[in-house]
Image (cartoon, rainbow, N blue to C red):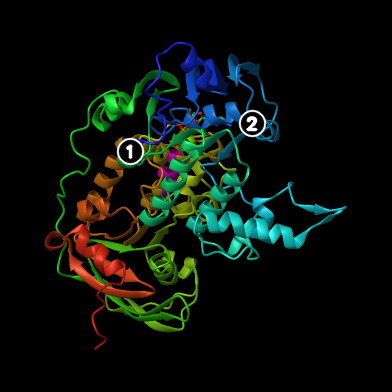
Amino acid sequence: MPPSAPDPVHAEPPSTAATAAVLLRLEGISKRFPGVLALDGVSLEVRRGEVHAVCGENGAGKSTLMKVISGQYPPDAGTLHYRGEVCQFRSPADSEAAGIAIIHQELNLVPHLSVAENIFLAREPRKGWLIDRAALRRNAQHCLDRLGLDIAPDVLVKTLSVAQQQMVEIAKALSLNAQVLIMDEPTSSLTESETEKLFAIIHELKRAGVGIVYISHRLDELAQIVDRVTVLRDGRYVSTDRFADTTVEQIVAKMVGRSLDDVFPRRTSVPTPEVLLRVQGLTRQGAFHNVNFELRRGEILGFAGLMGAGRTEVARAIFGADPIDAGQVMLGEQRLAIHSPRDAVRHGLAYLSEDRKHDGLALKMTVAQNITLANMEAVSNRVGLIRFDKEQVAAARYIKALDIRTPSSSQIVRLLSGGNQQKLVISKWLFRESRVLFFDEPTRGIDVGAKYAIYQLLDELAGQGIGVVMISSELPEIMGMTDRVAVFHEGRLVTVLNTRDTSQEEVMHFASGRSIPSPV
Ligand SMILES: Nc1ncnc2c1ncn2[C@@H]1O[C@H](COP(=O)(O)OP(=O)(O)OP(=O)(O)O)[C@@H](O)[C@H]1O
Ligand SMILES: [Mg+2]
């Protein structure tokens, strides 16, 4: 904290001054869903000008607690004090009006409305009865500028990438000028530079006295902004500490109830020299140009690059989800004619999207149905009827392997926590027994323990001879898990490096376009 700003979190004695600084206090909050006690007597206090992190594994109850604060869910027990008074908000609109804004973990924008309309939804500036379009654009532009975003206020939200949508969510929450700002995984799909911008704004808000609740599975970023940290485990309150008095290792140990020694498992698999997938001259105007690479059997190849570098676009094109203008894809000796994801799946390609809500899951179906969705044949009898016993066995296997927290395999997927939904997308494609797997941000929003399990799975898959492409914005995970790394910059595959012989700095160097080899 800069010396000019008073330190409301650490400086005061725990008497009257500290009490006055308390914006929000939750006491003994409990919330039960059918089959799940999501919160069991949880307490939390948010002070003026502090960033208060809430940590816990997937399914620990973090998002539920935030939804209780915002009035989306009424608690079954407990009280909420806001600015010294007992409150119970009846709806998110109610809490918003009182000065509590929330950036949701799962994006909540209206896809067919513009960015400006989304930011000021139901709060549009008016001239008489009519919406004042000019003011709407101007105000939206101001919000976007504040975050340094290069997004036009008029574009439709559905045309934006996940990361851009997340930035719009943030812009929207900031525009409310709230006293309490809740951020549920705000950086999970942001790049480092976007995250830095967000942190600069968080520091600004802190100085202005806003109380911030910050939820993130990226524990290494907490040190930059967090004053205090509360840990939840299995819906129960574990502890609250000043961040300066604890360590990330201690936080993790409290989250998982044991200590984790390593972040990455040792790679046991070794890639074979056999080329499994060969991509040549892949081009789509305006998205990527002349992309060439090879993926070997048993290899984990990383795709690194900044947001908008074209990594997801290339993967989607190979998978047949988007068209190409030129180029070809060879699987072994066979040239693939892929016109749709259905073709790709038939050839044994799989793509695990970063946008699980839209591409990955059937949210209204059960856990078991989702796992078996991409490979119905494996759980059907000869005439195509689904054998529920087989479906259950398959579901049970993956629920155990990935430690998916769900009351049963027949739970509706929409009701799982964000991280557990992500694990489910992965199970679905693992069950498909694919030959080439594209993982787009596989550990986004996933807790440390489960990340480790997913890394182990990647290593196992490679060991079985599957080719794995891992698209990730988290360089440490690329460095920790891949054999080689393909670096993208502005739609071009700039270079492919041996992971063992390179460094994060070198990868960043190429990713930022600072040294592009001259075209041959
Ligand atoms: N509407 C709901 N109906 C039924 N169960 C729910 C509902 N919302 C959450 N749950 C369950 O409550 C528990 C807590 O979920 P919550 O979303 O709060 O976890 P979280 O800590 O935010 O996890 P993550 O890190 O994965 O986002 C989970 O077991 C989840 O499946
Ligand atoms: Mg959550």
Q: Position of residue 200 (x, y in %)?
A: 42, 47
Q: Residue at x 61, y 30 (%)?
A: 70
Location of residue 502 (image quadrant): bottom left
Q: Which residues are magenta?
A: 419-425
Left/right placement of residue 172 relative to residue 416 reads right
Q: Residue at x 54, y 41 (%)?
A: 104
Q: Quadrant of the N terminus?
A: top left
Q: Residue at x 55, y 62 (%)?
A: 160
Q: Which residue is mark 1?
A: 219
Q: Nearer the viewer, residue 348 or 206?
A: 206
Please name the amino acid that badge 2 sits on: Gln
Furthest toward the top, the residue is: 15
Q: Residue at x 24, y 73 (%)?
A: 495
Please name the amino acid that badge 1 sits on: Leu
Q: Position of residue 459 (x, y in %)?
A: 22, 50
Q: Quadrant of the C terminus?
A: bottom left
- Residue 72 - label: 2
